[in-house]
Amino acid sequence: MTTGRFSELDGLRGLAAVAVLVSHFTGAYDTINVDAPKAFFDFPYGAFGVQLFFLISGFVILMSARRATEPSDFVISRASRIYPAYWLSLIIALAVAPVLHEPHLRLSAWEALLNFTMGQRWLQVPNAVDVYWTLAVELQFYVLIAVLLIVTRCRLSDRVVSRVSFFWLLMAVLVAIWAGPYSQGIDPQSVITPVKIVLNLTLAEYAPLFCAGMLAFTARAQRRMSPLLLLSSGSAVFVTGVLHSWVDAAVVAGICAFFVTVTMRTTTSWLTIAALQWLGKISYSLYIIHAVIGYVTITAVLPFVGRDWAMLLAAAVSIGASWLLYETGEKRCSAVLRRLLEKWRDRRKSRTAEGASGEG
């Protein structure tokens, strides 16, 4: 069994966050602001940093779940980790919306309120910020793990993980084959509603990535490659090809191969470079805040410094804002929320115990 911190994961997070940021500050910004000058280059494949995030999540979430002695440990850990920084980023997004004047930020009061749940994707409500759709996907994965912890009484053995992964992969492939004719070349959120609902509920497009991440964790612990890990990576490639394009599938194949190689190696020294490690540490905050702060910055300074310098300034401002969000939301506010949730759980346990003794 592997012990100690796997520092390369932070390096991978840093790479994923930077890739997404560059993608958004180049072509994605141009798509939203069609009259703005074009960037000197475009990096659309940076959006696939999301797929790398999902692979990392599968690895990390299984590791976290196995530390839980009861399901509430996992729930409290995840809720206190993701919600405080998210809520702060959402408040910032709603506050700067009148300044940004971007179509994707115009929400009704009810839609804005539902965004605080992080489950707006399931309710067919627009995201306050485009990148938030991935958080609902993550949340759905957390729910699955929490259910497994309840069912197995916190015994998420390798056998359980393998069986769940196999059936989830099978479902994902079958749903993808069925949905493929409706989704090829179409934005996932523009697919006809019945098909989109099935894709969202089953996580067909992303299930193989989460499975690959979990199986990479067990394979690293066992220090041997798992055939099911290769199958899950292949399924991720196949599902992407069927639902989108085989060019996209080739990119996913490269990402999966890279991730599996890193997780099966004892160490990958270049991923432990200090700058990548630091970016990995703030990667969650960077991911959820950059599209708001960065777009505002580009729009504000573009007339004075030009498109390319505006992008660089936006990157610097976004990273600075991310560090502040990390220090405030991920460290301080998360610790406060965790203590509150633990106290609430302990009080409920105490009341339940008192009720049981009173009945006795």
Image (spheres, rainbow, N blue to C red):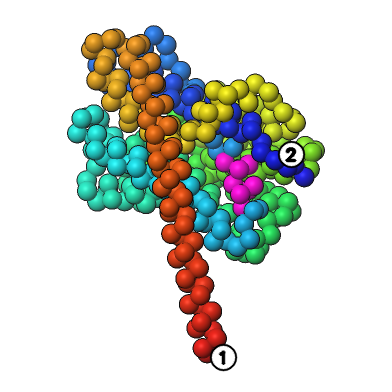
Q: Which mark is residue 220?
A: 2
User: Residue 354: image x %, image y %?
Assistant: 51, 82
Tell me the kind of residue under disc 2: Arg
Q: Nearer the viewer, residue 234 or 57?
A: 57
Q: Which residue is mark 1?
A: 360
Q: Of tags 1 and 2, which is closer to the observer?
A: 1
Q: Position of residue 152 (x, y in %)?
A: 66, 63
Judged from this view, the residue extending furthest toward the bottom is 360
Horizontal side, residue 70 vs residue 187: left or right: right
Q: Quadrant of the N terminus?
A: top right
Q: Residues within 10 Å of mark 2 (few under 14, many from 20)?
A: many
Q: Is residue 14 left or right of residue 225?
A: left
Please name the residue shown 23% across and 29% down the image.
Answer: 100
Our reading of the magenta stretch's main secondary structure is helix
Q: Nearer the viewer, residue 113 or 322?
A: 322
Badge 1 element: loop
Instruction: Point out which mark residue 140 bears.
Output: none
The residue that appears at 63% across and 42% down in the rendered structure is 59
Magenta residues, start to end = 57-65
Question: Which residue does the image show at 51% across and 75% down from the upper left?
Answer: 350
Residue 322 screen position, x and y as percent: 41, 32
Specify whether 228 is left or right of 127: right
